[in-house]
């Protein structure tokens, strides 16, 4: 009798458990996350696996957490190779498992010396046998000598390579005669290259076929067939799809006869930043390259400029090489010469050269930032007027830390009417006096209408302009006087407090 009772209880218990399981399964099916198709769920897992973990603990990385949630999630996770492609300090302990489950997907590898005790050689030795699956490699802080382990095997699928070593691999006075070429010089899919303080011969194929090139603190030695600025430009010619070019503190030690190579066409370039480069190289690059009309950022900071002719010469056709310049409406000019070499004559020559060599005739907005600490870095009235004479379409001028005497160039006289379409003047940290400002306002509002298209000054914005804003009674006098001339005065501190907007 007891046997029959126990059997009945077991059967009833099993039935109840099946019912509860079915109910649980049905409830899970109604949960929103479980109604997401597998392909979308797979993409979510992929994003989680390649994002920054919320916790450094190994047991909390997505690669180990996701498969433990439920049977379906485990199946989707194991069928999502890109979830397992990340190899870095977080996933290093399970790198063998990650490589196995990533199948044929490109691996994204990052080594940062600051984290953990693992050396680069130890870290990379576990991954090198799978180099044919590398998709990206970022190395931050490894000793340059350790990178020799990457010299023997090609990386056929590598698309991104970023290297920043702990110290300069080569100094200008002590450059080794040879240097191993990474990946046996064979990276046919490489598109994004960043080298910081790490030298690779210009004869390497690393420099060809790129869409993004970042070089910083690299010195190219005196070697036959290498170290030449012309060799570098030849490599650029082999990067017709280049979109970003960033060069900072790059030096070419190979002496050569300066001649201008054939044009280098970069029809897709969007960002070009040249910082702390020798003027001769910048000149060579500007004279050779033909940039895209879609170029949105061009920044230059050159060394050893003795005269503007080092950059602005007849050999550089800015209107042809930079077709966007002629249609650009907004220009910013900022000066920061080294105080040891700054001189008034050079500043004056640069202002003149900018106006006469760059196609600025269609510019509408001009912003000029001077140097409030070194007066030699600032223009005088003559050089400022020389620049304005080439800007007939300007409607708004912003002057920051510029001598107030420069405002004399905007006075309208029988012999001079610069910037005839100017209607807005913005001054910041300009020590202008009440009389100077009123004289300018009267001049820009009381002229005759003989010049077609001429505009009157309608708005003046002031911020940190000496005594004008230090005394409320003087501020009131200025506002009232300009108001009688139908000029709106904006005191920027008040505007900043009320709306949160910034002068710049």
Image (spheres, rainbow, N blue to C red):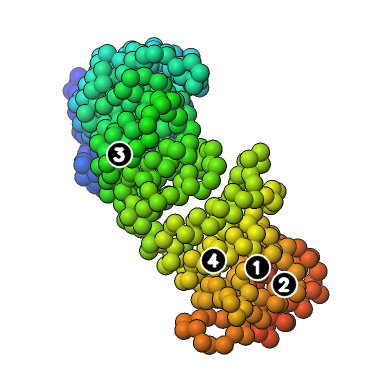
Mark 2 nearby-residue class (10 Å; few <14, some 14–19, many ≥20): few
Say whether residue 144 is left or right of residue 64. right
Asked whether disc 3 touches disc 4, contact meaning CB atoms under 8 Å apart, the reply is no
**Would you say residue 48 is visible in this rendering?**
no
Question: Which label sits on residue 436?
Answer: 2
Residue 488 position (above or below residue 27): below
Mark 3 or mark 1, earlier in chain: 3
At horizontal 75% and vertical 69% (from top left) the residue drawn is: 433
At horizontal 36% and vertical 45% (from top left) the residue drawn is: 287
User: Where is mark 1, residue-wise?
Assistant: 407
For the N terminus, give its image quadrant.
top left
User: Where is mark 3, residue-wise?
Assistant: 261
Q: Marks 3/1: CA distance? A: 43 Å
User: Where is mark 4, residue-wise?
Assistant: 388
Asked whether disc 2 touches disc 1, contact meaning CB atoms under 8 Å apart, the reply is yes
**Residue 405 percent location from the top left of the image:** 69, 64
Q: Marks 2/1: CA distance? A: 8 Å
């Amino acid at each position: 009798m007891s046997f029959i009772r126990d059997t009945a209880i077991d059967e009833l218990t099993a039935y109840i458990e099946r019912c509860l399981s079915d109910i649980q399964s049905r409830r899970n099916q109604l949960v929103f996350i479980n109604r997401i198709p597998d392909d979308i769920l797979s993409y979510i897992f992929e994003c989680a696996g390649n994002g920054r973990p919320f916790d450094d603990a190994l047991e909390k990385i997505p690669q180990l957490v996701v498969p433990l949630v439920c049977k379906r999630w485990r199946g989707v996770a194991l069928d999502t190779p890109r979830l397992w492609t990340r190899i870095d300090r977080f996933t290093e302990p399970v790198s063998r498992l990650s490589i196995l489950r990533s199948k044929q997907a490109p691996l994204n590898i990052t080594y940062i010396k600051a984290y953990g005790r693992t050396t680069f050689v130890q870290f990379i030795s576990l991954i090198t046998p799978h180099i044919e699956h590398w998709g990206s490699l970022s190395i931050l802080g490894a000793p340059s000598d350790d990178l020799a382990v990457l010299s023997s095997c090609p990386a056929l699928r590598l698309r991104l390579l970023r290297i920043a070593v702990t110290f300069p691999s080569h100094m200008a006075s002590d450059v080794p005669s040879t240097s191993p070429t990474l990946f046996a010089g064979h990276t046919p899919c490489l598109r994004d290259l960043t080298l910081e303080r790490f030298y690779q011969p210009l004869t390497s194929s690393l420099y060809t076929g790129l869409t993004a090139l970042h070089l910083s603190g690299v010195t190219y030695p005196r070697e036959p067939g290498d170290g030449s600025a012309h060799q570098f430009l030849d490599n650029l010619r082999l990067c017709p799809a280049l979109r970003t070019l960033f060069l900072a503190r790059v030096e070419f030690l190979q002496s050569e006869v300066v001649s201008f190579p054939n044009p280098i066409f970069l029809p897709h370039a969007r960002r070009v930043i040249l910082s702390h480069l020798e003027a001769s190289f910048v000149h060579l690059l500007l004279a050779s390259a033909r940039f895209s009309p879609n170029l949105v950022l061009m920044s230059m900071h050159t060394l050893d400029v003795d005269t503007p002719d080092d950059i602005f010469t007849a050999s550089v056709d800015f209107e042809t090489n930079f077709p966007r310049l002629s249609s650009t409406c907004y220009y910013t000019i900022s000066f920061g010469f080294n105080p040891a070499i700054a001189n008034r004559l050079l500043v004056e020559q640069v202002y003149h050269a900018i106006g006469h060599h760059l196609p600025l005739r269609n510019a509408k907005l001009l912003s000029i930032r001077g140097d409030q600490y070194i007066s030699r870095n600032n223009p005088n009235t003559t050089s400022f007027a020389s620049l304005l004479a080439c800007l007939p379409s300007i409607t708004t001028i912003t002057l920051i830390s510029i001598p107030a005497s420069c405002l004399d160039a905007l006075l309208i006289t029988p012999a001079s009417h610069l910037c005839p379409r100017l209607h807005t003047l913005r001054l910041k940290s300009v020590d202008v006096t009440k009389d100077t400002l009123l004289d300018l306002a009267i001049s820009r509002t009381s002229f005759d209408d003989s010049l077609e298209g001429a505009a009157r000054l309608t708005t003046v914005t002031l911020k940190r302009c000496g005594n004008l804003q230090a005394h409320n009674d003087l501020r009131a006098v200025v506002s009232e006087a300009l108001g009688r001339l139908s000029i709106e005065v904006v005191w920027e501190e008040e505007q900043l407090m009320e709306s949160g907007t910034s002068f710049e």
